[in-house]
Image: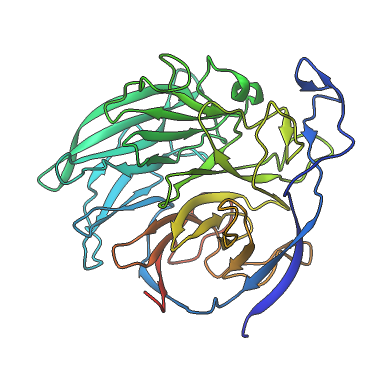
Amino acid sequence: MKGVSCVTVMTVLGVAVNLPSLVNGQASTNDRPIMGDLPRVSLEIYYVDPPGVTVETLLTGLDVVWSLEFAADGRMFLTEKAGRIRVVSAEGELDPMPWASLNNVSAEIRENGLNGLALHPRFSEEPWIYVMYTVDKDGDEVANRVSRFREVNGRGINEEVLLDDLPGSTNHNGGRIRFGPDGMLYVGTGDARVRERAQRLDNLGGSILRITPEGAVPDDNPWPNNPIWAYGMRNPLGIAFRPDDGALFVADHGPTTEWEPRIGAFDELNLVQKGKNYGWPRVVGAPGIPDYVDPLLSWIPSVPPGDLVFHNGDLYLTALWSEALIRMRFQDSGDPNHVTGVERWFNSRVWRDGVPAVGAYRRVRALAVGPDGAIYMGTSNRDGRFEPGPDDDRVVRIVFEDN
């Protein structure tokens, strides 16, 4: 088949051996985390041209598309990193005027800016759009904020701040927000380059937060008056709920550039449960330690994750540095959480002459499933990591033959 190659890569699926000793719950060797073993090798299939799909470009000339979401009336909303919420008609026409412009966004540095976006679950009756973005604080410091805007006459007005002063930095801000099937808003926050934040329940960094649409802490959160739902994350950028049962999946960045010698990634896919600890920075990979939840998958070399979405039973993950759309399949009738196959689309292989192969769309981030059954994917090529193309950034539409 055209454009297909098979490459063996290391994928965490289970057990660990030869663990370093623990001191007060932390690794005792140079403050490095306990590293779970990679007990077996999984085969990933690479498709330059994935079978059974066609891709068409919907929009070009955008500026770091961070989030996409559809309203019931067929409109698509998206965020641009510099602080604009844009709207696209059901016919695919981009409104030249922003739906809302945020003037207080700190967006000059790599991962700062207007990031997450989510529509109220009953948007037609409660026309609120929720966002997460970075703001300047005193001096050179920044923080992150979750707020919402109400749609009036086709524009967003009357901002209401729901969560403020969330930890912020040049990197590791998290930023993905999603409404769950329970009607609550889930917020991914990064450790903002201070690792131990992720292990503190009195700090909202490195966690998955859960709040009501009005910003209150739900009574059934694991800790009273605390928005933390789960913790021990480094930089969670993908949040998706499985349609069949509402299970929460989160994709988290591993420590690609931390410590010397470098650990090498350990980007993770996690099944996230109420009140659980996912280990960062105490552990990476799957060491099998009862206090921490092991990931379903962990990648070396780095992916790293950009977004997650379910489509027809498969889970799709955008890969930033390795420039691919990753499809994960769950075809084990006895275990719905067992990943049985992994495919990388729009790329040929991980390495070429010591560097990642260039993907067809380069850095891909935002994902959404449209009312037409297609997957919509946005790129982040103007985010300062690499040289963008002349028509970046863009939104493409991935159409499945069986739709």
Residue displayed at 57% across by 63% down: 331
Residue 276, picture quadrant: top right
Viewed as shown, does residue 154 lie left or right of 399?
A: left
Q: Which image quadrant: the C terminus?
A: bottom left
Viewer can see residue 110: no
Residue at the bottom extreme? 1
Total numbered labels placed on residues in the image: 0
Q: Is residue 273 above or below residue 75?
A: above
Q: Nearer the viewer, residue 119 or 240?
A: 240
Q: Nearer the viewer, residue 335 or 340?
A: 335
Viewed as shown, does residue 269 lie left or right of 261?
A: left
Residue at the right extreme? 18
Residue displayed at 36% across by 30% down: 146
Q: In the image, residue 122 lies at what x, y percent?
A: 21, 43
Q: Nearer the viewer, residue 175 or 21?
A: 21
Q: In the image, residue 74 lies at what x, y percent?
A: 22, 60
Q: Nearer the viewer, residue 140 or 60?
A: 60
Residue displayed at 16% across by 45% down: 155
Q: Is residue 64 above or below residue 28?
A: below
Q: In the image, residue 99 lies at what x, y percent?
A: 22, 47
Q: Which image quadrant: the N terminus?
A: bottom right
Q: In the image, residue 260 lies at what x, y percent?
A: 82, 36
Viewer can see residue 68: yes
